[in-house]
Image (cartoon, rainbow, N blue to C red):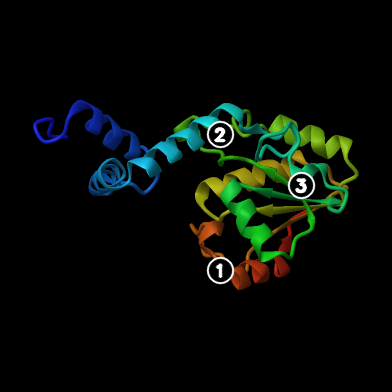
Amino acid sequence: MNNQIFSPKITAVIESLRKLPTIGKKSSQRLALYLLDKSPETAITIANSLLDAAENIKKCKYCQSLTEKDICNICSSQNRDKSRLCIIESMIDLIAIEEAGFFKGKYFVLNGRISPLDGIGPNELKLDILEQIIINREISEIILAISPTVEGETTAHFISQMIGKDIEISRIGFGVPFGGELEYLDQQTLIHAFNARTNIK
């Protein structure tokens, strides 16, 4: 960053924005200059919203999704099928499935995938919490909606080995290319992927 062009405070904003996914040098500069020059009110609103969320959002004690309460709305709902559990990688995946509107069970959000090279193992994915959920609930079916990347395959295999033999386990597949991410699938492809899932145990 050329400090002769930008003041320290502007540079700090640009560098902060660059930490966001998919935001590079040019994009962070454009965003920072727009917010500070063209729309300072928007910058203040965004900053206040982020600060409030950062101080009040937590992980649901059951599914590990983001919520303001100890237990999220999906986990606390009596209208969801608690016998079906869908294991997903991220909140983005949860949103995609919920917006498609076909799944009425409950979720467990891994918030990642097993990746030894990145220092991410079962403990980082809170698989001990998942194991307790499986033990304590009357679950009849577990759906692994995990992207078919190398790390995703490793994660799915580990989880399938961890789960008891009396529970049906299936993986989504149709329309999801190897290395694909669920968040990029359109709703129809996602629905087909669930309908065409295959039993692995």
Please state the horizontal and vertical placement of residue 163, each as a whole percent of the image: 78, 42
Q: Is residue 111 above or below residue 4?
A: below
Please state the horizontal and vertical placement of residue 44, each as a whole percent of the image: 40, 36
Disc 3: which residue: 74
Q: Is residue 88 above or below residue 61?
A: below
Disc 1: which residue: 186
Q: Identify the mark at residue 53; answer none if there is no mark.
A: 2
Find numbered disc 3 in the image and state the secondary structure of the residue it sits on: helix
Q: Residues within 10 Å of mark 1 (few under 14, many from 20)?
A: few
**Residue drawn at (28%, 49%), measured in percent from left and top?**
27
Query: Is 187 left, or right, of 171 in this rendering?
Result: left
Q: Earlier in the sequence, mark 1 or mark 3?
A: 3
Q: Amino acid at mark 2?
A: Ala
Please state the horizontal and vertical placement of residue 145, each as a whole percent of the image: 65, 54
Q: Residues within 10 Å of mark 3 (few under 14, many from 20)?
A: some
Q: Identify the mark at residue 145; answer none if there is no mark.
A: none
Q: Earlier in the sequence, mark 3 or mark 2?
A: 2
Q: Earlier in the sequence, mark 2 or mark 1?
A: 2
Q: Amino acid at mark 1?
A: Asp
Question: Are the residues flagged by discs 1 and 3 in contact, CB closer than 8 Å?
Answer: no
**Residue drawn at (81%, 36%), measured in percent from left and top?**
133
